[in-house]
Image (tube, rainbow, N blue to C red):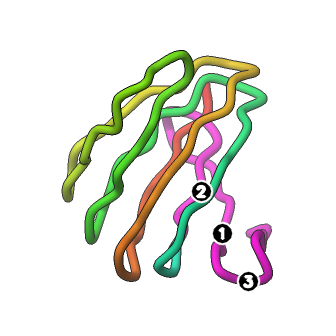
Amino acid sequence: MFKTNEYFEGKVKSIAFETAEGPATIGVMAAGEYEFGTATIEYMTVTSGVMTVQLPDENEWKEYKEFETFIVEKDKKFKVKVAGDTSYRCLYK
């Protein structure tokens, strides 16, 4: 069955499911700034909207648009800014 997750006082929500490639979540973020930590390697793909991301050990922020993917290594933290409601898929490896 699906598992739902809620973070940041309900501003980020996701539904976990299994894919042929492994576990994944589909989620949405309300406008705001967030910091996430990883327990596995994460492949984050923006599916709607725009995410501005500061990857671990980076000083620069980079913008990711629809259908663009960024990868975050295991046991790292990364920051995300979204100006409006944004959706994503996260694949865990």
Cα separation between marks 3 and 1: 13 Å
Under circle 1, the secondary element is strand
Compare marks 3 and 1 and give the one earlier in the sequence: 3
Residue 45 left/right relative to 16: left
Q: Is residue 34 visible?
A: yes
Question: Do the residues bearing badges 2 and 1 touch, measured as CB atoms within 8 Å?
Answer: yes
Residue ID for mark 1: 15
The amino acid sitting under disc 3 is Gly
- For image coordinates 69% across by 24% down, the residue present is 76
At x 50%, y 38%, the residue is: 20
Q: Tell me the residue at 79%/68% (across/down).
A: 3
Q: Nearer the viewer, mark 3 or mark 2?
A: 3
- In the drawing, does residue 36 fall left or right of residue 7? left
State the residue position of label 3.
10
Q: Amino acid at mark 2?
A: Thr
Q: Is residue 31 magenta?
A: no
* Residue at which label 2 appears: 25
* Residue 66 drawn at (x, y percent): 20, 58
State which quadrant residue 9 falls in: bottom right
Q: For the N terminus, give its image quadrant.
A: bottom right
**What's the mark number on residue 53?**
none
Task: Give the Cα distance between marks 2 and 1.
Answer: 5 Å
Disc 3 secondary structure class? loop
Q: What residue is at 35 percent from the left and 51 percent from the top?
A: 52
The part of the chain drawn in magenta is 1-27
Type of secondary structure dominating the magenta stretch: strand
> Which is more N-terminal, label 1 or label 2?
1
Left or right: 41 as drawn, with respect to 52:
right
Q: Position of residue 58 (x, y in %)?
A: 45, 20
Secondary structure of the residue carrying tag 2 is: strand
